Image (cartoon, rainbow, N blue to C red):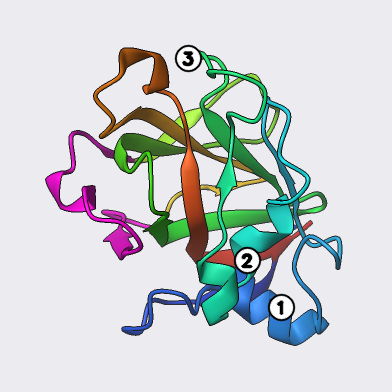
Amino acid sequence: MEQTVCDVAYSNDPLKGIFTHMTKSLSKNPIQSGFVKVTMPTVTDPFHNLNSIFDYSVNGLNQCIYNYFCGFPTSSQNWIQFDFGSNKVAVSGYTLRNSNRYLTKSWKIIGSNDLENWNDIHEVKEYRNSDKPNINMHFSCERLSESYRFIRFVQNENHDRNPRCKYIIQIAALELFGRVFSN
């Protein structure tokens, strides 16, 4: 039976969600503490490691993670995955922070418990307000999602005009809101 670990609702601070709560609770970055494993299907730049996605300090928000260290990503390489291990997350909203380039335009948040069957949690198509660098964009889901071990951010398009760059992800932060359950 699932037990609630934490319930973090959005309260007008776009970067105080589940990852911030767990950073404070565990006194470490969520990746370093083992709370979540973050992966991308491409080689990542060692100078822009995945830990920085949870660093909401002024310096951290000026960093970014990206998926084009070794070339242009394809439509099967356009995601960031969060694996919560023995926990599951039900998403009620999220905040995405653009970096300074390859600004996100169309994306979706999906969830799975087996890496085979994926369910849509929230989708945004051709979001015009994301064409400015270094801004926080908060989105609420229509309802609390089912609980999932795996959550993916899938970018379908950015604002770059070069078609080869369509699947490049370059973001400074992604924060989730909702409930964390332990099994």
Determine whether, in the image, residue 177 is placed left or right of residue 38: left
Between discs 1 and 2, the one toward the N terminus: 1
Q: Residue furthest right?
A: 33
Between discs 3 and 2, the one toward the N terminus: 2
> Identity of the amino acid at label 1?
Thr
Disc 2 is placed on an element classified as: helix
Nearer mark to the viewer, of 1 and 2: 2
Q: Position of residue 130 (x, y in %)?
A: 23, 50
Pointer 2: residues within 10 angstroms few (<14), some, or many (20+)? many
> Identity of the amino acid at label 3?
Ser
Q: CA distance from mark 1 to mark 2?
A: 9 Å
181 and 81: which is toward the camera? 81
Tell me which corner region of the image, top left, top right, bottom left or bottom right, holds residue 181: bottom right
Contact between marks 1 and 2 (CB within 8 A): the answer is yes
The residue labelled by disc 2 is: 54
Tell me which corner region of the image, top left, top right, bottom left or bottom right, holds residue 7: bottom right
Quadrant occupied by the N terminus: bottom right
The residue labelled by disc 3 is: 75
Q: Residue at x 58, y 28 (%)?
A: 68
Q: Residue at x 58, y 22 (%)?
A: 117
Q: Position of residue 33 (x, y in %)?
A: 86, 68
Q: Residue at x 31, y 83 (%)?
A: 12
> Identity of the amino acid at label 2?
Phe
Disc 3 is placed on an element classified as: loop
Q: CA distance from mark 1 to mark 3?
A: 32 Å
Do we see residue 105 in this rendering?
yes
Quadrant occupied by the C terminus: bottom right
The residue labelled by disc 1 is: 23
The magenta segment is 123-144
Q: Position of residue 104 (x, y in %)?
A: 33, 41
Residue 69 vertical placement versus 2 (above, below): above
